[in-house]
Amino acid sequence: MVCTDTWCVWATRLTNLYNTTPHMPRTNTQADVALAEMVQNATEEQTFTLQQISDKTGLSAERVRQIERQALRKFRAGIEGWLKHEGFDEYLPDRTLS
């Protein structure tokens, strides 16, 4: 599994949003700082494996995978909420197949 820099940018944005949410106060951990540093220093074409992120952040590769999955769920929910709000219901995924 590869983490593209685009995903890392969105993960950083979601982390920043999470960090500034009043009902969920949180400070930047060493892992947050390490990931932000990786993203800032990455080229547009650069990708990272879960193991590379794990080595840099000090988190296990499994924990990095879990965080990735959680971030993608939050991102997807945000996009779906925006689509509903803006009246683009035809672009929402069909949940009856699940």
Image (tube, helix red, strand yellow):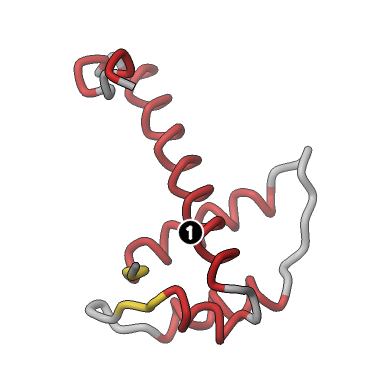
The quadrant in which the C terminus is found is top left
76, above or below 53, in the image: above
Image quadrant holding the N terminus, namely: bottom left
**Mark 1 neighbour density, 10 Å: few (under 14) some (14–19) many (20 or more):** many
Rendered residue at 69%/50% (across/down):
20
* Residue 29 drawn at (x, y percent): 73, 71
Rendered location of residue 17, percent (x, y): 59, 50
Percent position (x, y) of residue 4? 32, 69
Compared across the picture, whether 35 is left or right of 7 comes to right
* Nearer the observer, 47 or 54: 54
Q: Which residue is mark 1?
A: 11
- Residue drawn at point x = 42 percent, y = 66 percent: 8
Residue 10 x %, y %: 42, 57
Vertical relation: 41 (above or below) 61: below
Could you tell me which residue is drawn at 53 percent across and 82 percent down? 37
Is residue 36 toward the left or the right of residue 45 in the image?
right
Q: Nearer the viewer, residue 54 or 35?
A: 54
Q: How many marks?
A: 1
Report the amino acid beneath label 1: Ala
Quarter where residue 75 is shown: top left
Report helix, strand or loop for mark 1. Answer: helix
Q: Is residue 93 left or right of residue 7?
A: left
Residue 87 figure quarter: top left
Vertical comparison of 72 with 26: above or below: above
Relative height, residue 81 to residue 78 (above, below): above
